[in-house]
């Protein structure tokens, strides 16, 4: 007698697709794709309560004044500049290759891995805005200044260590940061040219 | 038609979305287009990041709230001085408060006055590491 082959009862899984669709739609609705990127800055420490506007004495040649007015115009020291001209200007200022007496002072400094260097470690880039300056202009200025530092650091890293800054070891990065310290200060906003 | 592989397919898409996306934490009440820049860094350690949104109210809320620039903290509008409480409150939920980063998502057309006010408060509350949120541009 030929026995009937026993059938394994199948699990009804026709609704699995619907369930996973619902899950998929739930995740599509509650999550967002954006990856968070941005320009990192470090604010200065808060002023001491008993500190009387102690102006830290900075020589005029050591300061690059970047001023932004309410209309979004850019003034660097005494020149009106276009945003594209800011990066070369900042690089020239930070480096002071030619030991120009109008650019920041060069100091001899012993840096690990780099030896004796002449660096402009007293320089300050001061960004001053008006209360009406559009944020976009301010951001582009910050971006250009950070770009100037990054380019200089990268050039130095390639010249000294033969690879870009991002791929240098921790010690090498510290040495390069000592050579080109990032000094962007932000003054209190003022009212330039009305609102 | 044989649809037995459909659930697997949909599950694959589901897992893909679960991995590449992040949970949206707040409902946005302001709209903003962040500026674009070239020197951007990725925000590491999501658990140490708090967000401050600045921009005009969204279209639905404009009728009640007007079109002036607003600050959003968590789920509501706030004044610049309230940022200090927000910072302190965010710190309590963080595993490592000293690594706190404030990510500022600010609309391009905002005027600097309000941003400077926020920065002053952030300085006073010792939240010194900030990040101006932006999109990458080549």
Image: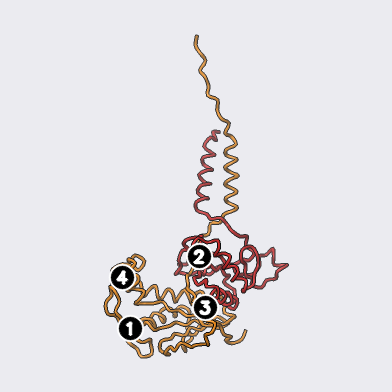
Chain colours: A orange, B red
Report, in whole angstroms, how far the alpha carbon at label 2 lies from the one at label 1: 42 Å
Instruction: Say which chain tag 2 marks.
Output: B
User: A87 or A51: which is nearer to us?
Assistant: A51
The residue labelled by disc 1 is A97
User: Mark 4–mark 2 contact, CB under 8 Å?
Assistant: no
Q: Chain of mark 3?
A: A
Q: Residues within 10 Å of mark 2 (few under 14, many from 20)?
A: some
Mark positioned earlier in the residue sequence (4 or 3): 3
Residue B90 lies, in percent from the top left, at 56, 64
- Residue visible at 35% across and 84% down? A96
In the image, A50 versus A96, the foreground residue is A50
Q: Tell me the distance, in whole angstroms, between the alpha carbons under discs 4 and 3.
A: 37 Å
Q: Which residue is mark 4?
A: A158
Q: Is residue A116 left or right of residue B15?
A: left
Q: Where residue A135 sits: x, y (%)?
A: 55, 75
Q: Residues within 10 Å of mark 4 (few under 14, many from 20)?
A: some
Secondary structure, mark 3, is: loop
Q: CA distance from mark 4 to mark 2?
A: 36 Å
Instruction: Decide: few, some or many residues near mark 1? Use Cα within 10 Å; few <14, some 14-19, many ≥20.
Output: some
Disc 1 is placed on an element classified as loop
Which of labels 4 and 3 is toward the front?
3
Between disc 4 and disc 1, whose residue precedes?
1
Which residue is under mark 3?
A46
Dots 4, 1 in contact, CB < 8 A:
no
How much space separates mark 3 and mark 2, taking CA atoms?
18 Å
In this view, the mark in front (3 or 1): 3
Who's the residue at 50% across and 44% down the image? B12
Task: Give the residue pinned by disc 2.
Answer: B97
């Amino acid at each position: 007698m030929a026995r009937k082959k026993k059938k394994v009862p199948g699990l009804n899984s026709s609704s699995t697709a619907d369930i996973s669709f619902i899950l998929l739609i739930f995740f599509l609705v509650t999550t967002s794709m954006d990856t968070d990127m941005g320009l990192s800055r470090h604010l200065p420490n808060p002023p001491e309560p008993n500190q009387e506007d102690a102006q830290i004495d900075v020589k005029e040649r050591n300061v690059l004044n970047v001023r932004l007015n309410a209309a979004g115009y850019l003034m660097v020291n005494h020149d009106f500049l276009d945003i594209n001209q800011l990066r070369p200007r900042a690089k020239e200022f930070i480096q002071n290759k030619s030991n120009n007496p109008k650019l920041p002072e060069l100091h001899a400094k012993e840096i690990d891995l780099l030896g004796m260097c002449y660096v402009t470690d007293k320089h300050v880039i001061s960004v001053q805005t008006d209360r009406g300056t559009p944020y976009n202009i301010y951001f582009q200025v910050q971006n250009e200044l950070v770009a100037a530092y990054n380019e200089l650091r990268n050039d130095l890293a390639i010249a000294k260590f033969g690879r870009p800054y991002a791929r240098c070891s921790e010690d090498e990065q510290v040495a390069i940061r000592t050579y080109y310290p990032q000094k962007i200060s932000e003054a209190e906003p003022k009212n330039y040219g009305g609102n | 038609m044989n649809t037995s592989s459909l659930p697997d397919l949909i599950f694959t898409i589901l897992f893909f979305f679960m991995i590449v996306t992040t949970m949206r934490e707040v409902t946005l009440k302001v709209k903003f287009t962040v500026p674009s820049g070239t020197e951007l860094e990725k925000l590491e350690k999501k658990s140490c990041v708090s967000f401050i949104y600045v921009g005009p109210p969204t279209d639905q809320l404009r009728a009640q709230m007007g079109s002036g620039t607003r600050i959003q903290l968590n789920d509501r509008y706030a004044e610049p001085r309230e940022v200090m409480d927000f910072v302190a409150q965010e710190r309590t939920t963080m595993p490592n408060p000293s690594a706190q980063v404030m990510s500022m998502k600010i609309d391009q057309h905002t005027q600097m006055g309000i941003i400077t006010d926020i920065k002053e408060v952030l300085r006073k509350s010792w939240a010194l590491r900030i990040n101006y949120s932006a999109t990458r541009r080549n």
